[in-house]
């Protein structure tokens, strides 16, 4: 068995075996609202941000750690084919969402503490229901291994040590997966926002 066909990332059910998933109405509304709300927050952020150099340095570093978490996660996941529980998925079941939160919070808090609170509220209102709804779909796709993973790994805030099920092989980061998921676009976005905040901090705009 190869490293990528480890127990923690195996395919478990066919489309014919999967029961229909009842969509949560709150999650449906959250999905509809996240784009317009996100655009509104981003617009206010870009116009009103007035960071200090100290705040930008601290917030930028926090945000960069979120970018690394996202990249690490993208290099492990194989969507809908195998359940990824290695790498960052041994710490949290939703490392992409967690990384995105850290990425957004760091930049927002650098601009102003009020934007940091806005990001926390946005994530709780919008992504809380989405994560809960996606749990149903993933559990349906991987009915055998998901329950054990769920019992041992938190949904959002990471555990301090990685969960390592007995007898499971560890998966490794794949640059091909990282590029395939186009995660480099997040890096470009991060650089653009940090550049904009630097211009705002210098008083040029």
Image: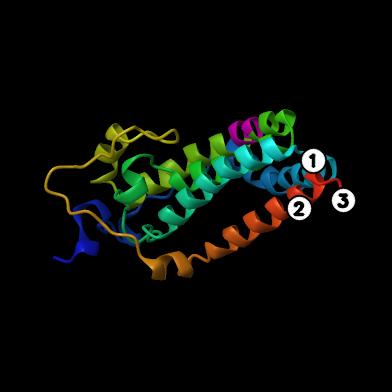
Taking the image as drawn, is residue 166 in sight? yes
Taking the image as drawn, is residue 22 in sight? no
For the point 76% across and 52% down, the residue is 196
So how many labels did they put on this image?
A: 3
Residue 38 - label: none
Q: Characterize the local packing of mark 1: few (<14), some (14-19) or many (20 or more) Cα atoms within 10 angstroms.
A: many
Separation of residues labelled 3 and 2 (CA atoms): 10 Å
For the point 75% across and 37% down, the residue is 52
Q: Which residue is mark 1?
A: 49
For residue 196, side relative to residue 20 (left or right): right
Q: Which residue is mark 2?
A: 196
For residue 180, side relative to residue 145 (left or right): right
**Of pointers 3 and 1, the one earlier in the residue sequence:** 1
Separation of residues labelled 3 and 1 (CA atoms): 13 Å
Disc 3 on helix, strand or loop? loop
For the residue pair 63 and 130, the one nearer the viewer reads as: 63
Q: Quadrant of residue 158?
A: top left
What's drawn in magenta, residue-wise? 120-125
Whole-percent x, y for residue 110 in the image: 68, 37
Marks 3 and 2: CB-CB under 8 Å?
no
Disc 2 on helix, strand or loop? helix
Q: Quadrant of residue 111?
A: top right
Residue 204 - label: 3
Decide whether the magenta segment is chiefly helix, strand or loop: helix
Residue 114 vertical placement versus 185 (above, below): above
Marks 1 and 2: CB-CB under 8 Å?
yes
For the residue pair 108 and 121, the one nearer the viewer reads as: 108
The mark lying in front, picked from 3 and 1, is 3
């Amino acid at each position: 068995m190869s490293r990528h066909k480890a127990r923690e990332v195996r395919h478990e059910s066919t489309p014919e075996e999967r029961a229909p998933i009842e969509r949560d109405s709150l999650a449906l509304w959250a999905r509809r609202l996240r784009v317009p709300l996100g655009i509104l927050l981003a617009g206010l952020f870009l116009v009103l941000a007035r960071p200090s150099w100290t705040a930008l340095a601290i917030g930028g570093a926090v945000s960069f750690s979120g970018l690394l978490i996202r990249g690490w996660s993208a290099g492990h996941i194989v969507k809908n084919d195998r359940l990824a529980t290695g790498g960052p998925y041994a710490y949290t079941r939703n490392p992409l969402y967690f990384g995105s939160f850290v990425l957004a919070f760091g930049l927002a808090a650098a601009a102003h503490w009020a934007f940091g609170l806005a990001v926390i509220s946005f994530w709780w209102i919008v992504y809380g229901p989405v994560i809960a709804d996606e749990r149903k779909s993933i559990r349906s796709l991987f009915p055998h291994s998901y329950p054990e993973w769920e019992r041992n790994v938190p949904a959002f805030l990471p555990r301090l040590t990685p969960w390592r099920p007995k007898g499971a092989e560890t998966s490794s980061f794949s640059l091909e997966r990282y590029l395939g998921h186009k995660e480099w676009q997040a890096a470009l976005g991060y650089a653009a926002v940090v550049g904009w905040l630097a211009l705002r901090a210098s008083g040029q705009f």
